[in-house]
Image (cartoon, grey):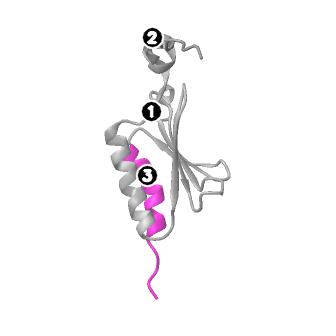
Amino acid sequence: MTLQPPTPFRPLAARQPDVAAEEVCFDRRELGVILSLYGQMVAAGEWRDYGISTLRDLAVFSVFRRAAEVPLYRIEKRPKLRTRQGMYAVVSAEGQTLRRGQDLAQVLRVLERKLIRPVD
């Protein structure tokens, strides 16, 4: 049996420096705001699962009622729209943009209204 020495791998940053630099993702403050709302909605029994996608031009936080469904809402971050309509948006399952703006907490208020229910 012949043994081959392991093939040395270059670090990921050395292999693809341009991909890692251009990828959009949520920072710690933004995730704190989003996960705070997510925790409230899980406690209310509205949401059960989430997914995070990071792409070249946008980052998406998807919210699911069940894991096998399409997302109920998508919270998107598009830095290229920062100077125009705002880089944060909440998009419904049908693809309708519910709210867009510069401040993430203000944009997420459209989802907090779902927690308010009439008491019988």
Give the residue type that dot 3 points to: Leu
Query: For the residues carrying marks 2 and 3, which lies nearer the camera in this image?
Result: 2
The extreme bottom residue here reads 120
As shown in the figure, which amino acid type bears the numbered disc 2? Ala
| Quarter-of-image position of residue 40 | bottom left
| Rendered view: 87 above or below 117 | above
Q: Mark 1 to mark 2: distance in Å? A: 20 Å
Residue occupying the point 36% across, 36% down: 27
Image coords of residue 62 (percent x, y): 54, 48
Residue sitting nearer the eye, 35 or 81: 35
* Residue extending farthest front: 1
**In the rendered structure, are the residues bearing label 2 and label 3 in contact, judged by CB atoms less than 8 Å apart?**
no
Structural crowding at the residue carrying mark 2, measured as other residues with C-alpha within 10 Å and reported as few (<14), some (14–19) or many (≥20): few
Is 83 left, or right, of 94 in this rendering? left
Say whether disc 3 or disc 1 marks the residue closer to the N-terminus: 1
Q: Give the range drawn in magenta.
A: 104-120
Q: Which of 115 and 50 is in front in this view?
A: 50
Instruction: Please give the residue where the numbered disc 3 appears in the rendered image.
Output: 108
Where does label 2 land, which residue?
Answer: 14
**Disc 1: which residue:** 25
- The residue carrying pointer 3 sits among few (fewer than 14), some (14 to 19) or many (20 or more) residues within 10 Å by Cα, namely many
Provide the secondary structure element on which disc 1 rests. loop
- The answer to whether residue 92 is left or right of residue 17 is right
Q: Which of marks 1 and 2 is in front?
A: 2
> Of marks 2 and 3, which one's residue comes earlier in the chain?
2
Task: Quote the CA–CA distance across marks 2 and 3.
Answer: 38 Å
Tell me residue 22's x, y (percent): 48, 20
Distance CA(mark 3)–CA(mark 1):
17 Å
- Which quarter of the rendered picture does the N terminus lie within? top right
